[in-house]
Image (cartoon, helix red, strand yellow):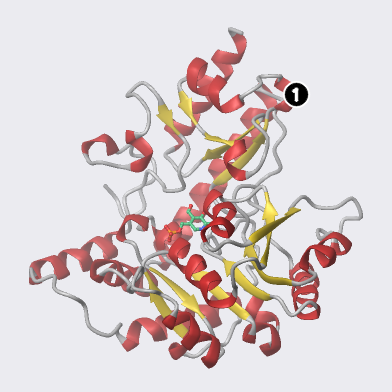
Amino acid sequence: MSLHDFDTVIDRRQVPTSKWDRYPADVLPMWVADMDFAVAEPIVDALRARLDHAVFGYGGPVPRALRELIAADMQDLHGWTISPADVVFLSGVVPGFNQALKTVTRPGDRLVVETPVYPPILAAAGHWDLTRVDVPVRPVADGSGVDLGRLTVALEGAAAFLLCNPHNPTGRMRTRTELEAIAGACLASDTVIVSDEIHCDIVYGGRQHVPIAALSPEIARRTITLMAASKTYNIAGLKTAYAIIPDAELRQRFVAAHLGLSEGANVLGLVATEAALRYGRPWKAALLAYLEANRDHLMARLAAEIPEIRISAPEATYLAWLDCSALDLGDAQKFFLDKARVGFNPGADFGGTPDHVRLNFGCPRALLDDGIDRMVKALSQR
Ligand SMILES: Cc1ncc(COP(=O)(O)O)c(C=O)c1O
């Protein structure tokens, strides 16, 4: 296999996986957010070298070099100046935003989220006895992208805003202007921002991701940003992520809030993350080109063959949010699972309606085509 081969279909059923074990063997899984691609060679090489050492006791302090690589990436990719000391390593972004909520809220506080949204973000309020306030993520009619009136009301007295940018499941990316509006509203209501930016590297059309904390030092002081190499480099199973918290006091409170539940990162995950950031750029560039072509292919085929499905082209992520309401399928996930044997995520899991599904196009083109063929055939036989 060449370094940048995304076309080969790898039989992932040879090992246990969330994605491929969930449904019977005749179902094509296009749900959970990982990709069906082998990771970049330098990551495998680094892991092999670490495996050869053959001792896997508790890891020591995270190498300074890795912190520096993350700081350099923030500068280089997002124009955000951070210090290597601002980074706190975690076993995942989901544990990270839960730890952040534990840090900055008390039971009974209000938490604002933009719906539909990634299910663990929806669930987080319940873990900490918070009152969730949902704001629709849809662009508003005036084209501003943020319903500032509604957001301002939602934020009144809210302890935290759990932002997801780029947004899962819609693939929308917040523009700088939108982020400024959101950040301004959070400042005005004295709300802490917890920003899940795990998909920040998977962006299309030369777009530039803006970390909300990069807007100003004032915003950075009230923000806990969560990122990982896991989505971009397909290493989510290695359970490694990081928080970036420039404010020293907030960072110390965050670290103290782990409660013995989430004790830092995995030794192999740190090795893979370092190799990804150090050597992964050429692979990432090839991946983004492939994913963008997959996205365009999906959009073109759906427009031509199932025009009833409404979808706005994802600007980021390898996830597409399909509005199937015009097809009148009722529960669209169930229809496609039963009749097409394709496994999507149900829209209702995101706080959306059952006539929506989330499709993952992070797969070889042949699998994407297989999925679309199955959908077209099932609809033609209705
Ligand atoms: C928005 C978002 N946050 C977090 C995660 C998962 O993060 P982790 O596996 O690091 O907990 C995902 C995975 O799909 C995601 O889409």
Instruction: Please identify the quadrant where the C terminus is shown.
Output: top right
Residue visible at 58% across and 18% down in the picture: 376
Q: Quadrant of residue 276?
A: bottom left
Viewer-proximal residue, 273 or 157?
Answer: 157
Instruction: Residue 21: give x, y in percent of width and height.
Output: 32, 34
Viewer-proximal residue, 325 or 378?
Answer: 325
Instruction: Residue 76: give x, y in percent of width and height.
Output: 54, 80
Going by the image, does 200 lie left or right of 183?
A: left
Instruction: Residue 216: give x, y in percent of width and height.
Output: 70, 86
Residue at the outermost top position: 381
Going by the image, does 19 lie left or right of 133?
A: left
Going by the image, does 246 lie left or right of 16?
A: right
Residue visible at 61% across and 10% down in the picture: 380
Q: Is residue 11 visible?
A: no
Q: Is residue 325 visible?
A: yes
Residue visible at 36% across and 67% down in the picture: 91
Residue that badge 1 annotates: 326
Q: Quadrant of residue 240?
A: bottom left
Q: Is residue 195 above or below residue 199?
A: below
Instruction: Residue 293: give x, y in percent of width and height.
Output: 55, 44
Q: Is residue 143 above or below residue 196?
A: above
Badge 1 amino acid: Ala
**Secondary element type, mark 1:** helix
Residue visible at 70% across and 20% down in the picture: 327
Query: Pointer 1: residues within 10 angstroms few (<14), some, or many (20+)?
Result: few
